[in-house]
Image (cartoon, grey):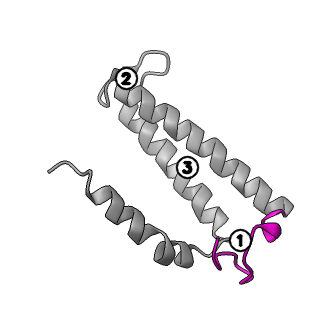
Amino acid sequence: MRDILRNGTTGTSNMNTPKTIELLSILVEELGEATKAAGKALRFGIDATNPATNTPNIESLEREIADVLVAIELLSDVVDMDAIKRDYMPAKREKLAQWRLK
């Protein structure tokens, strides 16, 4: 891990604060809920409606994606998102580009 912590330090030791642990817990929970919503959309169809809640799968997925984005936004208090965008995201975009449907 490079210099992505807000205080400019490297390593993971400063990530062990109660605030960071709480924010990471929230992120994990929201990612799990987004995974579940995406799985239901794949299994039953993005345009299908959940009969138990009468909610369209697309709406559930959109809400869960929003929750993930909020969790990431909250995490930006302790993690330098600009460094992540600069140091990690370009390589991931390049790697995924080879798998895009054309």
Point out the tag, 2 or 3, that comes first from the N-terminus.
2
Tell me the number on the disc at residue 67: 3
Whether residue 11 appears in magenta in the rendering, the answer is: yes
Q: Nearer the viewer, mark 2 or mark 3?
A: 2
Direction from residue 54 to residue 24 in the image, left or right: right
Whether residue 95 sits left or right of residue 37 in the image: it is left
Q: Residue furthest left?
A: 102
34 relative to 80 in the view: left or right: left
Amino acid at pointer 2: Arg
Q: Hey, which quadrant is residue 24 in on the image?
A: bottom right
Q: Amino acid at mark 3?
A: Asp
Secondary structure of residue under mark 2: helix
Q: In this view of the protein, which residue sits in the foreground, 44 or 94?
A: 94
Q: On the rendered image, what quadrant is the N terminus found in?
A: bottom right
| Mark before the other along the chain sequence, 1 or 3 | 3
- The numbered mark at residue 43 is 2
Does the CB distance between marks 1 and 3 fall below 8 Å?
no
Measure how far apart labels 1 and 3 are at the Cα level: 18 Å
Compared with 25, 97 (above or below) is: below
Tell me if mark 1 has few (under 14), some (14-19) or many (20+) residues whose alpha carbon lies within 10 angstroms of its own: some
- Residue 15 position in % (x across, y down): 78, 66
State the image quarter where residue 58 is shown.
top left
Measured from the top left, where is residue 19 in percent x and y?
A: 80, 62
Does the stretch in magenta take in 92?
Answer: no
Q: Main secondary structure of the magenta part?
A: loop
Q: Is residue 20 visible?
A: yes
What stretch of residues is rendered in magenta? Answer: 1-16
* Residue at the spot 35% in from the left edge and 60% down from the top edge: 95
